[in-house]
Amino acid sequence: MSRIMNRKTKIAHHPGPRKLPTDMRGFDVLTRGGLPRGRTTLVIGGAGSGKTVFALQTLVSGACRRGEPGIFVAFEENDREIVANAASFGWDLPGLEKRKLFFLNAHLSPAVIQSGTFDLTGMLAILKAKQREMRATWIVFDGLDVLLTLLANPALELQEIYRIRDWLVENKLTGILTAKIGPDMVSQTDYGFMQFMADCVIKLEQRLEDGVSVRRLQILKYRGSEFATGEFPLSIGSLGMEVAMPDTGEHTEVATRERVSAGFDALNIMLGGGVFRGTSTLVTGAPGTAKTTLAAKFAEAACLRGERTLYVSFDEGPATIMRNLTSVGIHLDKIVKSGLLRIYSERTESGGTESHMIRLREAINEHRPRCMVIDPLSAVAKAGGLSAVRSVANRLLNMMKEKKITIVITALVPGEDRAEEPEGFQVSTMADTWIHLSYLVGGGERNRALTIIKSRGTWHSNQVRELILTDAGPLLTDIYSEQGEVLMGTLRWQKEAQEKAKETQRRAHVDHKRRDLKLAEAETNLRMKALQRDLERQRIELVTLSGEEKVHPDVLNKDASKRRRALGVDPRNAERRDTTTHSTSRSSGQGRNASRSAKKGLAEARKGHGK
Amino acid sequence: MMRLFVAGQAPNSVQAIDNLKAICRQYLDHNYSLEIVDTLQDPFRALTDDVLITPTLVKLSPKPATKVAGNLSQRSAVLLALGIKEKLG
């Protein structure tokens, strides 16, 4: 998209031809800005390939959107047919004709008799006068081949083609020439010459591929300019023609941290709080794995937030969808009535992929949703094959990113429980979040399991959960895995009951133990108190003992002095020394004993406590 | 009454004038009126007569009106358009 935005500046610096945008969706990107200004563009293709629509649409959008007047010279269809044709696309040609468009009916009436050769000098003179009058920018010569057949002479054909080209250059008109040229006419001289003289050649084609009608556009040449090579899907919808644009390769979207509900709380928790706004979520699963339920839940949650939502169903009609969803507690009828939800359903076999794409875009532009569901996208493959799905998905997701629409896409996978998308589908790489639904068979039951395979930029649960559908909506529960086996349904219920019983047992056991310990503690306390009493008693004893000692020192001293006198020691010195030594040694010995017994008591107390 | 639309001195236009004058001389004997319109000079005249390619001869009367496109080199076609029966010899 930004390429288009930058167009003006790019042209200013680009040495190539100046270009005139066509405003046709996709086309200006492929041509890097539009058609060569003041030059000739040749549009070739078989009958019904869309040449006239291409030319007319370019002219109309130039006149309406850019105020560039244009002249349409119709050699093939008469102007009434063209007006009717244009009206089917909502283009008001009679209204435009007054100011910005001029139609010249150059359709040669069969009543005109031809005699000899003629040339375009007079017509070009008329057109020049008209151009001056209305200051035209564009001119279309539609159905040039019809005119050339009238000339019935290759030399004259070349001459007239030259005349037109020179005239365009001289008058600074941007010209579109259309010519019906089938593949069988490639060898014709005028074809080669027309290709040579035009600055830009566009080939349109309508053909059958796998029994489905497809339109293709290819740019064969663009003198002096780079352009996208290859064939591109072309579609003609109710708003005109558009080219399916390849990925522009530039990402302009702004990442948001805003989370929106993925449908219900349990799933949001698994996704770390929901999905980011403007991201895409792919839900894959085998038939009946509740993909639609999940998608509808998402749509319902969006509507309950007051956000406009578009539910695209390629499966069933709105009434059937709503009825089926009622059984799982999803009531869409009210929100459909409120206008917030629009259910758009379509059979994929009807029409080609590209027309689906166009109608989808129209529905989006009409409803302007903030959230969207496509259920299932894989059905698009029916209309156009897998490459079509890929192309649709790619463009769709880009469009969603651009418009910041949060989308949930479901896809049917053929496998039973493999987390695989249909081969060649490749949507999972494009989607931001991928949720896979599967069946797990065990214990004679088939149960639904939900896994989040990826979720970009956010934490998400790696657990497989069991998805249970109740009449109040979907639920997710933990599943048990036992020795590598996942238990669901009844087995899970049994396991839960077992676990519950075990838990009760464990609780009882703990209670018992707690009581035991409490008793032991009380006992120890008692013993500690007894020991304390022992301790106190021993201390008192000790004190009493030292009291006895102090009562008799004189008696002891007398005995000692008697001994000393017998030994011939100075009684005063000896007496003093002796008394002190004796009393200290005595008292310290007593102290040690006391402390030892106290320690013993404590140790015993500890032992008792430890029991 | 006839009107011939030409484009200046374009070869086809010059031839058409010559061819028409020859036919008129041979078959109509001055019993006609011819107006020659140069689309280069007066482009919108051609539009009002619904003529685009040049040269084109428009027979206005007697009715029905007919148109002949080209340089009028195929005389039989011109005579048919003008409602003139070819004189034998």
Image: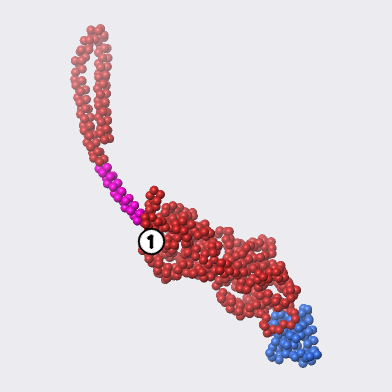
Chain colours: A red, B blue
Residue A590 falls in image quadrant: top left
Which segment did they paint magenta?
A488-515
Name the residue nearer the viewer: A461 or B77: B77
In the image, is residue A135 part of the stretch drawn in magenta? no
Where the C terminus of chain A falls, by quadrant? top left
Tag 1 secondary structure: strand
Q: Is residue A572 above or below residue A262?
A: above
Asked whether residue A393 is in view, the answer is: yes
Residue beneath disc 1: A469
Chain where mark 1 sits = A
Point out the residue furthest to the front here: A444
Please, what is the dominant secondary structure of the magenta stretch? helix
| Left or right: A326 as drawn, with respect to A34 | left
Q: Position of residue A292 (x, y in %)?
A: 43, 63
Q: Is residue A55 above or below residue A14?
A: below
Name the residue nearer the viewer: A522 or A75: A75
